[in-house]
Image (cartoon, rainbow, N blue to C red):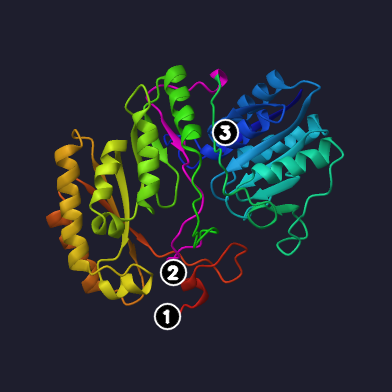
């Protein structure tokens, strides 16, 4: 059986394990590959990486991969790749990321951008099974062999987004594992450069596929806490109900955290009952701005007074019924169109006065450079709006 190793690259060693590398590993195992995943690889020492690889290498080892949530790289990984090419020149090195690579490496052979299940299958078939040549995105770089999975090999929607971890992943019961329920977002916010926007159809995975993954993680490792990786979990009431029903069939009570669109939660009061039934009690609200003109300019049009009143009502509901496990985090963006120092101060003051016991954060608006190779948001395309 062919063998490969995927090294996950992370910004912070204390965050939950990245999902992407483990999802690719599960997919390849279903296609007759033996894949091992190493988490937090950029926090290892070079000698540790070398010794690990030597302990795993066999004549069946064909590739190593690096999984990045964003375009992250580190000197220790570049040195490790140099050593691989010097000591094991037959090994192919592959990078996989949600975005196109913004870093330079002298040793990575291929890059995959986007959800990569289908793209990695095509690439490995080409390399090791006489398969056809993959479609490379020559418009991005003539020096890097980049496969744009989003455009050439779209892996969405998928009925199965299964990830079954292995004993050699050394999962601990206290961990937070990431899980997907769908791919793509139905909204098209002006500041967002997520590549799958405006989704109109049902892109959710099968409920049984979701249930089996959670039950397996609990039965084998005792894990009960999960971060939902969806861009917006509560986009449809039917979606919440679907996965709440799946959770009701589990032998344990999990706890979920993820992105919740606040205006939908305020305008659809029955959704909070379904979220409670699912035990989805960790809410990250992308409010962006309490200045109504600013919010409307980016595609969030609910009147600020109604949104504020609704959020207080939501908080009171979950604090009352959520077994003291509700956590509400609000996020605002500094620098949106029509925002002023006064409106920012007023938002900050309201949060201090009315969001006691919960949390909030503020981030500056990120505007990629005009020559970026990734998707541009509507704000980036028209800075004068």
What is the distance, in whole Å, between disc 2 and disc 1 at their CAs?
Answer: 10 Å
Count neighbours of disc 1 (C-alpha within 10 A) and say few if under 14, some if 14 to 19, many if 20 or more: few
Q: Position of residue 49 (x, y in %)?
A: 63, 28
Q: Nearer the viewer, mark 2 or mark 1?
A: 2
Instruction: Look at the numbered disc 3 and give the secondary structure of its residue.
Output: helix
Q: Work out whether 178 lies above or below 288.
A: above
Residue 179 belongs to magenta span: yes
What is the distance, in whole Å, between disc 3 and disc 1 at their CAs?
Answer: 41 Å
Residue 29 belongs to magenta span: no
Question: In which image quadrant can residue 160 be found?
Answer: top right
Going from the N terminus, do you reach mark 3 or mark 1 first?
3
Screen quadrant of the N terminus: top right
Q: Of residues 32 and 91, which is closer to you in this image?
A: 32
Disc 1 marks which residue? Answer: 385
Q: Is residue 229 left or right of residue 371?
A: left
Disc 3 marks which residue? Answer: 22
Instruction: Look at the numbered disc 2 and give the secondary structure of its residue.
Output: loop
* Span of residues in magenta: 167-193
């Amino acid at each position: 059986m062919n063998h490969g190793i995927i090294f996950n690259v992370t910004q912070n060693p204390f965050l939950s394990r990245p999902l992407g590398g483990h999802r690719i590993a599960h997919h390849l195992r279903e296609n007759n590959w033996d894949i091992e995943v190493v988490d937090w690889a950029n926090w290892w020492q070079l000698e540790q990486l070398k010794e690990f690889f030597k302990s795993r290498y066999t004549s069946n080892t064909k590739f190593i991969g690096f999984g990045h949530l964003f375009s992250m790289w580190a000197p220790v990984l570049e040195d490790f790749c140099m050593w691989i090419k010097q000591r094991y020149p037959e090994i192919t090195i592959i990078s996989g990321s949600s975005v196109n690579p913004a870093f330079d490496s002298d040793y990575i052979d291929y890059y995959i951008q986007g959800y990569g299940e289908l793209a990695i299958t095509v690439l490995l078939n080409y390399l090791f099974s006489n398969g056809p040549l993959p479609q490379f995105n020559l418009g991005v770089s003539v020096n890097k062999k980049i496969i744009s999975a989003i455009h050439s090999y779209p892996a969405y929607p998928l009925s199965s987004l299964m990830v079954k971890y292995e004993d050699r992943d050394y999962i601990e019961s206290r961990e937070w594992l990431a899980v997907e329920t769908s791919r793509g977002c139905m909204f098209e916010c002006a500041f967002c450069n997520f590549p799958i926007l405006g989704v109109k159809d049902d892109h959710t995975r099968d409920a049984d596929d979701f249930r089996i993954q959670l039950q397996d993680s609990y039965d084998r490792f005792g894990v009960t806490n999960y971060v939902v990786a969806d861009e917006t979990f509560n986009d449809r009431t039917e979606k919440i109900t679907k996965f709440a029903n799946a959770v009701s069939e589990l032998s344990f009570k999990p706890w979920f955290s993820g992105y919740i669109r606040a205006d939908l939660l305020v305008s659809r009061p029955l959704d909070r009952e379904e979220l409670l039934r699912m035990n989805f009690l960790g809410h990250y609200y992308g409010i962006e701005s309490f200045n109504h003109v600013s919010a409307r300019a980016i595609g969030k049009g609910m009147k600020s007074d109604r949104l504020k009143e609704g959020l207080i009502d939501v908080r009171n509901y979950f604090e009352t019924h959520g077994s003291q496990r509700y956590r509400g985090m609000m996020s605002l963006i500094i620098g949106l169109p029509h925002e002023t120092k006064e409106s920012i101060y007023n938002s900050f003051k309201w949060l201090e006065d009315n969001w006691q016991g919960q949390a909030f954060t503020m981030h500056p608006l990120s505007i990629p450079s005009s020559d970026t190779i990734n998707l541009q948001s509507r704000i980036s395309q028209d800075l004068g709006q």
